[in-house]
Amino acid sequence: VGHFLGKNRLSIGAVVQSVNSPDRELVRVQDLTPEKADQLIWLRARVHTSRAKGKQCFLVLRQQQFNVQALVAVGDRASKQMVKFAANITKESIVDVEAIVRKVEQKIESCSQQDVELHVERIFVISQAEPRLPLQLEDAVRPDGEGEEEGRATVNQDTRLDNRVIDLRTTTSQAVFRLQSGVCQLFRDTLTKKGFVEIQTPKIISAASEGGANVFTVSYFKTSAFLAQSPQLYKQMCICADFDKVFCVGPVFRAEDSNTHRHLTEFVGLDIEMAFNYHYHEVIDSITDTMVQIFKGLRDNFQTEIQTVNKQFPSEPFKFLEPTLRLEYTEAVAMLREAGVEMGDEDDLSTPNEKLLGRLVKEKYDTDFYVLDKYPLAVRPFYTMPDPSNPKYSNSYDMFMRGEEILSGAQRVHDAQLLTERAIHHQIDLEKIKAYIDSFRYGAPPHGGGGIGLERVCMLYLGLHNVRQTSMFPRDPKRLTP
Amino acid sequence: VGHFLGKNRLSIGAVVQSVNSPDRELVRVQDLTPEKADQLIWLRARVHTSRAKGKQCFLVLRQQQFNVQALVAVGDRASKQMVKFAANITKESIVDVEAIVRKVEQKIESCSQQDVELHVERIFVISQAEPRLPLQLEDAVRPDGEGEEEGRATVNQDTRLDNRVIDLRTTTSQAVFRLQSGVCQLFRDTLTKKGFVEIQTPKIISAASEGGANVFTVSYFKTSAFLAQSPQLYKQMCICADFDKVFCVGPVFRAEDSNTHRHLTEFVGLDIEMAFNYHYHEVIDSITDTMVQIFKGLRDNFQTEIQTVNKQFPSEPFKFLEPTLRLEYTEAVAMLREAGVEMGDEDDLSTPNEKLLGRLVKEKYDTDFYVLDKYPLAVRPFYTMPDPSNPKYSNSYDMFMRGEEILSGAQRVHDAQLLTERAIHHQIDLEKIKAYIDSFRYGAPPHGGGGIGLERVCMLYLGLHNVRQTSMFPRDPKRLTP
């Protein structure tokens, strides 16, 4: 196998197999500005589009969200044969080009680099794409409804997901997942500054801690095990083990046969647990401040990504207050009743009612983010601390973005005796949760926490409408590939 | 349920249920220095030890790795009853104390806060530990062999792991897992600075990509699925999808019935994948620099943790070179042969030979970290790029710390045609890896990467001898709990 650099000015190169490193700098597309005018540069990029026209071939060369026009024209430097060769390079192929950067008189509106174009002198194919693509990138970024009259296609979600390796190349996908990477980083950096320690919790567990519903079973050598529905027990063990404040980022598994816009069978949990001194509102304050730091970080550092996504999926900018709005459950019920909803004091919120409440809160307080505190005890898990002043309620809370739940949390019962009573009340088999209850027998500080769904945060922050848009390789009851 | 603050100066309080927040600052043990002398402070801590002596009771109060002596003595502020109460508080209980900070004339050698003690005025039990602990913290931090003559116990590993919530409270465990948190942070921060994007890859997969051995099976609604043995395929898809440089941190599952000091069935993978320009040594350079940044960050910011672990498990400081030493496989074979090992050119390294090689390299080059490059093609997976200059070898590498492998990586075959040939050569069913091969059909840049085992890095950096010491809740063929 030979090297990809032929002696000719055009070549379908052999596979780059690390034979040697030419002393050659590759320029980034985003750095192609008028300052580089008249320089001879090398560039590696994808062929985004290609259009031959007589003795010329116009290519658009792309790197992620950036692209530049390149011209191969018959003349001193390029032969007729080379123009033909260039015109035949399949879309999405990766090429190396040697070219002179030239300023253009009229801005090239269709490219991110509007002030320059490349006059190509040599071109090599580094990796050739098959001629027939399963989806077209232009179609995949077209806003719904646009170009319908011209009969232009959009790409449906299954086609996107089946061909994710191409769909992820769109400017929209690039922006979504770069922003998602930012959410994780902001989450961790904020908590690290607050003195939290990152922990790693096991995903294969021996017993389904919360009663056994919706759990995936794993065959484990000669026995069987389960996939963790949350790191709950392990976070709490770390608190009982004096780590004081912990967080973890990792997969969470739910064997729920829900085929909705917001359910996945595997998603990424951003989990927090912390000891507090006197009141679980200390926990709420830590979590809401973390969310606010994430929102600010996105607003300040990811405007390009937000704007890019908005071009395809328009939405209102995400609004939040400082300090975060905290409503009590009873207030929410009152607001809903005033809007005509019939519900009992201790009824749980349905998804439509959560959405309606989100709209009412937005109207009244002008925020897309708020905390709903003091849920009815009956609708929460057994390990939730009851409200000391009203046994019908609990020291628990959900957090909402644009009317959809992104976090569920609570003060946890840290006393083995009370925990046993609550488990009995919920008719849970004490044998099955013995290890969990025993964790609290050797001194446990009061503590609370919550779990955030990463994909939902990204979906709702960006005003998207399906959690599969913010999961790189989503898993649902009907999808296990790619 | 009432509030835990009684009117008395001592109380077994009710469970902290967030009734109210007293306007009271809790001081941290580590902040108890002579500057605080004669101040009246509040403190929440565990009772580490308790010793009654006539009209006095000496407590050692602990917060993580810090502790301070506290004195309850009959006098103006404390009654005889209170001393008796204090003496009866079980070890590991959590207490709130109000106390005056007093300078001491003679340093208290047994405590981290050697210059002050607390004169307790009020004491409340926030959470009471059961009187009989399954293990003693003093025993759990005792170096092997120490105190054997006095008949003092150490704690065996199964007892530790069975009672992890107590074992994790030791100074050694606190240090190990705070350092581990640091490794993750240094890994991500270094790569983020280098322009890498963090990705989240699915753990439930539809097909076992590497042939199907050692894979856990999951029942998935009406079908079955597998747990990912690595994020390999997904990292590579991200490269084919133009993310250019990616990393991920997440669980990795191996259904291998290996009961050794260094194998886990679930561990945390620190994974890297990147496109390169001309030579896969660009990838090696990025990874080794990342490791060096981790080693430097630990050395500079985690000395307390390193020293703490060393007290119980003495080891030599970890040595590394800049730039990192890179040896070729043939050189390693020559060194081993010179040391008397008989092996063929293309034989894989056995674990004992890896260790021996580590010692030889340490003697010759004075480094605990190095790269072994150009492994025989035959011992590597089918997707490994062959060496263009010698088809018996490959563009692949392992990295070693103290003679044990912590990373395996390679240039990957990015050409669908060559990949198909390699799979056929390995007698892999092409149908099963169709989706994988198809990922490379639409233009793929040359790329490489590797996967690092977090627990191994921590174990070997600290010179520990069992990977279960650096996994909070380890999983092996025989352990699924806690």
Image (cartoon, coloured by chain):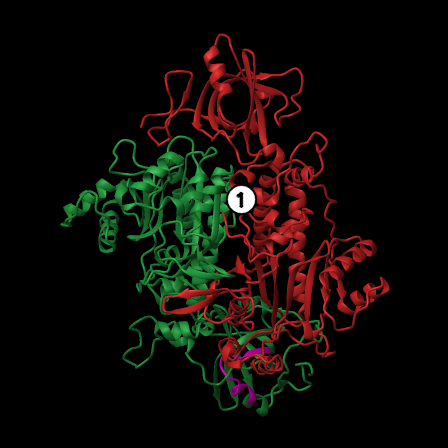
Chain colours: A red, B green
Using a 10 Å C-alpha cutoff, classify the residue at mark 1 as few (fewer than 14 neighbours), some (14 to 19) or many (20 or more). Answer: some
Lateral position of residue B397 relative to residue B5, left or right: left
- In percent of width and height, residue A433 lies at 52, 77
Could you tell me which quadrant the N terminus of chain B lies in? bottom right
Asked which secondary structure carries label 1, the reply is: helix
Q: Which residue is mark 1?
A: A162
Name the residue located 58 percent from the left edge and 36 percent from the top edge.
Answer: A170
Looking at the image, which is closer to me, B460 or B300? B460
Q: Quadrant of residue B32?
A: bottom right
- Is residue B19 in view from this perspective? yes
Looking at the image, which is closer to me, A131 or A471? A131
Is-magenta flag for residue B91?
yes
Placement of A393 over or under A154, stated as above or below:
below
Placement of A129 over or under A177, stated as above or below:
above
Q: Quadrant of residue B40?
A: bottom right
Name the residue located 53 percent from the left edge and 48 percent from the top edge.
Answer: A473
Q: Chain of mark 1?
A: A
- In percent of width and height, residue A416 lies at 56, 80
Looking at the image, which is closer to me, A191 or B266? B266
- In percent of width and height, residue A222 lies at 36, 69
What span is colored magenta in the figure?
Answer: B85-96
Placement of B169 over or under A34, stated as above or below:
below
Could you tell me which quadrant the C terminus of chain B lies in? bottom left
